[in-house]
Amino acid sequence: MTQKIKLYGERHTNTNYLSKLIELNLDAQLVEGVVPTYIRTLERWTGSESLRDRYFQRTFSETLGWKHAAVPTGIDADEVVFVTLTKNPYAWLLSMYRRPYHQHYAQPPSLEEFLTLPWQTVGRENVADEVANPVQLWNLKNRSYFHLPSERSLHLRTEDTFLDASAVVARIAGTFAVPRSCEQFVDFQRSTKKLADRDGEYYRDYYLNERWRAQLTQAALDLINAELDADLLQRFDYPLITQL
């Protein structure tokens, strides 16, 4: 029987890229983590995103929720294995600042302001209607991944997919005994966000060489560190950055 894999990862963690790697290289079935096309069509007609929330509420037993959601406790799906994807919190916060999904500001905030403003969530996130700030959102989502059964879950980092994508695929295959669908590893070079100038090489350079550090300020760094869960940093093997 084809192994089912459920992928969880916050927005801006490159879940689309990892999904493509799994689809191209493994004989596995990804459990759907986004709404089907007809929901998107209805959403355009109604102008209401609540359709997405209701879809995942009604289909949770099949979909196990939105791929960007916080993982609830007590998931019961013996036939499914779980892969989670986490991004360096400093880089992730900068990505969220550039594109703050589902947030509506009267005026674009500075980075420092952004880091202190409450974050408004959507229903399918499985969290409170409001989170204290974006740093706490990173803490909350990534902490929730450890609600999954440890014997059937694998926690990966976005940076590792760029460092050696073939090794990440091999790790998934080996951890869950998933057969390969092809003899040679197949990468996915085209940008999953349809940006012509941002292919795999661009992202490898940006994240592995930490180009994002240039966008931080010391004030922003201090605000992040005041909220960041140090235990989670250690679990995911990320360093605490105290000086630029």
Image: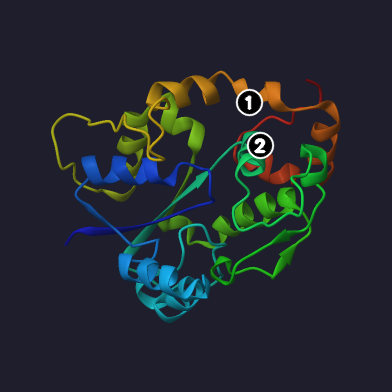
Near mark 2 (Cα within 10 A), the count class, few <14, some 14-19 or many ≥20, is some
**Which image quadrant for residue 210?**
top right
Regarding mark 2 in the picture, which secondary structure is present there?
helix
Q: Which residue does the image show at 38% across and 73% down from the upper left?
A: 42
Q: Are marks 2 and 1 in contact (CB under 8 Å)?
A: yes
**117 relative to 36 in the view: left or right:** right
Residue 215 % position (x, y)? 70, 26
Q: Earlier in the sequence, mark 2 or mark 1?
A: 2
Q: Which quarter of the image is occupied by the N terminus?
A: bottom left
Residue on which the image places disc 1: 212
Q: Is residue 173 visible?
A: no
Question: For the residues marked 2 and 1, what is the alpha-carbon distance in whole angstroms?
Answer: 8 Å
Q: How is the image coloured?
A: rainbow
* Mark carried by residue 174: none
Instruction: Return the residue found at the far bottom.
Output: 58
Residue 72 image offset from top left, x and y in percent: 55, 69
Residue at image mark 2:
94
Q: Describe residue 242's horizontal placement relative to residue 89 as left or right.
A: right
At a point 43% along the width and 68% down the height, the residue shown is 44
Q: Quadrant of the C terminus?
A: top right
Question: Residue 167 in the image: x percent, y percent?
Answer: 35, 30
Q: How many marks?
A: 2
Horizontal side of residue 26 vs 227, given as left or right: left
- Image vertical order of residue 101 relative to residue 194, above or below: below
Which kind of residue does numbered mark 2 sit on? Leu
**Depicted 220 relative to depicted 154: above or below:** above
Q: What kind of residue is marked 1?
A: Trp
Q: Nearer the viewer, residue 74 or 113?
A: 113
| Secondary element at image label 1 | helix
**Residue 230 picture quarter:** top right
Depth check, front residue: 172 or 224? 224
